[in-house]
Image: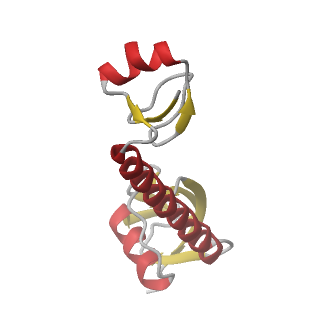
Amino acid sequence: MKVVLVANIKNIGQKGDEKEVKPGFARNYLLPQGLAVLADSDDAARILSVAKKKNEAKNKEKDKAEENLSKIKNKELTFRRKASKSGKLYGGVNKKEILESIEHKIGIKIEEISGVFPIKNLGEHIIKFDLPGGKKSEFKIIIEADAG
């Protein structure tokens, strides 16, 4: 019996999948629990349409993440701050400054970055972040001593 799943079901399939299941399993479990609808019903067509749209949106988001990843690859940001002779910054570089700088200079909006903030040492620092679409990447920032 062909059914369209309304929910994710372990060992069966994901929401929106059209599956062939045994008639007893469909009649006694899937249909009464509201976990599936018959494949030839109007509800099935609607669920398949929604699943297709979600899949297209997910693919579009994935493509956008790939594009953003290529934009940011091998780029670095440089910050100038006043520092002591030992290399400690007086102020520091915080998350907000880094996120704004990435958005302004590279044109990519990143929601969250990971690391210990504020950064209070001179030198190169690797910042890890997630792009929409599930892509993970790293970004290098350089903090230099301000001459003034």
Q: Residue 15, relative to residue 131: is it above or below? A: above
x and y, in percent, of residue 142 in the image = 57, 70
Q: Residue 23, relative to residue 2: is it above or below? A: above
Direction from residue 140 to residue 119 in the image, left or right: left
- In the figure, residue 139 lies in which quadrant? bottom right
Direction from residue 18 to residue 7 in the image, left or right: left
The reply to whether residue 44 is in sight is yes
Looking at the picture, tell me which residue is in the foreground, 10 or 45. Answer: 45
Q: Residue at x 50, y 36 (%)?
A: 14
Direction from residue 66 to residue 9 in the image, left or right: left
- In the figure, residue 123 lies in which quadrant? bottom right
x and y, in percent, of residue 64 in the image = 54, 70
Direction from residue 21 to residue 27 in the image, left or right: left
Q: Residue at x 40, y 57 (%)?
A: 112
Looking at the picture, tell me which residue is in the foreground, 29 or 75. Answer: 29
Q: Residue 54, relative to residue 84: is it above or below? A: above
Location of the C terminus (image quadrant): bottom left
Q: Residue at x 37, y 27 (%)?
A: 35
Looking at the picture, tell me which residue is in the foreground, 107 or 55. Answer: 55
| Number of numbered markers | 0
Q: Residue at x 31, y 20 (%)?
A: 33
The reply to whether residue 131 is in sight is no
Looking at the picture, tell me which residue is in the foreground, 85 or 129. Answer: 129
x and y, in percent, of residue 117 in the image = 39, 54
Q: Single out the residue that lies furthest toward the front.
A: 40
| Snapshot colouring | secondary structure
